[in-house]
Image (cartoon, grey):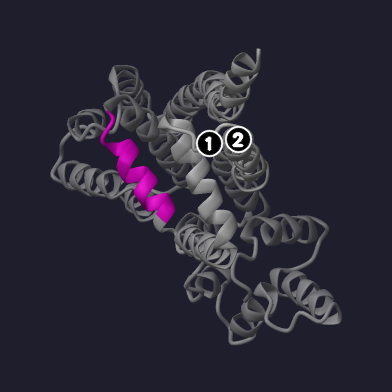
């Protein structure tokens, strides 16, 4: 299977075919045949079909794939228990939609700042490498060597202009290192580690984690899993080690007979509203609905946080880029004004 192949797309197509009256094997075989005709020999459907032809169930076939999400495997297994696989796939697609929606919020919020930063750096580099050397030659001819920050910037620009090969090699090396840093995932880890040191950002990122955790929990509970098994699946799906360890500790308390709401609250996995919702669910048995509501609450908080940060960061970043470019332009033209004053 190709890296990054969408399980959500496969589930959507499989759900449609099964609802149309096909068996699971027929549906997977149909998807495999289509992908084979398209020249995709290492497809998800083809791998699953190989396992299904060996007599395995769909959930066991998925569990044999290292990249299969644990939530998807558990949802399919629940669908096989209740003989309602299309509904189980529908529930998983709702879970995946929430996760993708939260991730798209982050990506969308980072696109504009990235474009503004790249544009500002590009303009600054153009001024330093192309425009500044011409000003430096004119200034040397009319007045002599500049001093202060203007002089330092002129000398740097002249050095870069005289050693373009070295400058281009260094720039290319920096670009390659940054690309490898981002592609390897180190940039994401370092950014998350930096944000984790800020209490306000850490609380909002925790909302992101808890929104996914409670949605996974709601999916498992709706599929008929007991609370202990649902927590085990949710803990395997957690992205943050602290959330995973907290779920494991809460699971241990629940298995020893402690109330669910108190166990989750003691591990910092729900606030006062979430604790009361889960406590109410302990009385009426509607854990699925309570977990779904808690997930929505954390999701809304995270989306509001991203929106507010975007509104603050965008104008601040624009001002920073404007100050950077404006400073270079002013430092270029100050000697010209000085020369005009002396000529008068």
Q: Nearer the viewer, mark 2 or mark 1?
A: 1
Look at the image and tell me in which quarter the C terminus lies. Answer: top right
Decide: few, some or many residues near mark 1? Use Cα within 10 Å; few <14, some 14-19, many ≥20: few
Residue 55 at what x, y percent from top left? 58, 83
Q: Residue at x 60, y 35 (%)?
A: 139
From this view, report whether residue 67 is shown above or below residue 242: below
Q: Residue furthest bottom?
A: 54
Q: Is residue 139 left or right of residue 259?
A: right
Q: Which residues are magenta?
A: 187-198
Q: Residue at x 42, y 27 (%)?
A: 294
Q: Residue at x 54, y 70 (%)?
A: 62
Residue 239 at what x, y percent from top left? 38, 50
Main SS of residues in magenta: helix
Decide: few, some or many residues near mark 2? Use Cα within 10 Å; few <14, some 14-19, many ≥20: some
Examine the image and state in which quarter residue 29 appears: bottom right
The answer to whether residue 211 shows anywhere in this view is yes
Choose between 327 and 43: the one closer to the eye: 327
Residue 259 at what x, y percent from top left? 20, 32
Q: Which residue is mark 2?
A: 139
User: Is 189 covered by the magenta stretch?
Assistant: yes
Between the C-alphas of marks 2 and 1, the distance is: 6 Å
The reply to whether discs 2 and 1 touch (Cβ–Cβ < 8 Å) is yes
User: Is 123 covered by the magenta stretch?
Assistant: no
Q: Which mark is residue 5?
A: none
Report helix, strand or loop for mark 1.
loop
Q: Which residue is mark 1?
A: 144
The answer to whether residue 318 shows anywhere in this view is no
């Amino acid at each position: 299977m190709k890296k990054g192949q969408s399980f959500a797309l496969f589930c959507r197509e499989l759900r449609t075919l099964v609802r149309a009256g096909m068996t699971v094997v027929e549906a997977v075989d149909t998807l495999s045949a289509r992908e084979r005709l398209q020249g995709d020999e290492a497809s998800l459907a083809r791998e699953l079909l190989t396992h299904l032809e060996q007599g395995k169930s769909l959930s066991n076939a998925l569990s044999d794939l290292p990249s299969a999400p644990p939530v998807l495997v558990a949802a399919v297994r629940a669908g096989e228990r209740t003989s309602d696989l299309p509904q189980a796939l529908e529930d998983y697609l709702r879970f995946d939609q929430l996760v993708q929606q939260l991730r798209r919020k982050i990506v969308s919020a980072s696109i504009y700042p990235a474009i503004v930063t790249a544009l500002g750096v590009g303009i600054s580099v153009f001024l330093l490498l192309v425009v500044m050397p011409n000003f430096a030659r004119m200034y040397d001819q009319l007045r002599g060597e500049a001093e202060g920050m203007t002089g330092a910037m002129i000398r740097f620009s002249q050095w870069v202009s005289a050693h373009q090969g070295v400058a281009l090699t260094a720039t290319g090396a920096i670009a390659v290192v940054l690309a490898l840093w981002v592609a390897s995932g180190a940039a994401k880890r370092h950014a998350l580690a930096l944000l984790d040191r800020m209490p306000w950002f850490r609380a909002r990122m925790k909302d992101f984690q808890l929104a996914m955790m409670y949605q996974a929990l709601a999916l498992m509970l709706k599929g008929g899993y007991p609370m202990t098994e649902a927590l085990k699946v949710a803990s395997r799906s957690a992205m943050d080690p602290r959330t995973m360890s907290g779920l494991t500790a809460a699971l241990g308390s629940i298995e020893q007979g402690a109330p669910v709401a108190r166990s989750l609250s003691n591990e910092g996995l729900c606030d006062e509203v979430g604790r009361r919702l889960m406590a109410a669910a302990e009385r009426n048995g509607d854990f699925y609905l309570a977990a779904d509501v808690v997930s929505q609450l954390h999701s809304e908080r995270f989306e509001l946080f991203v929106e507010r940060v975007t509104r603050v960061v965008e104008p601040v970043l624009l001002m920073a880029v404007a100050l950077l470019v404006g400073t270079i332009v002013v430092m270029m033209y100050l000697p010209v004004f000085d020369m005009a004053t002396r000529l008068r």
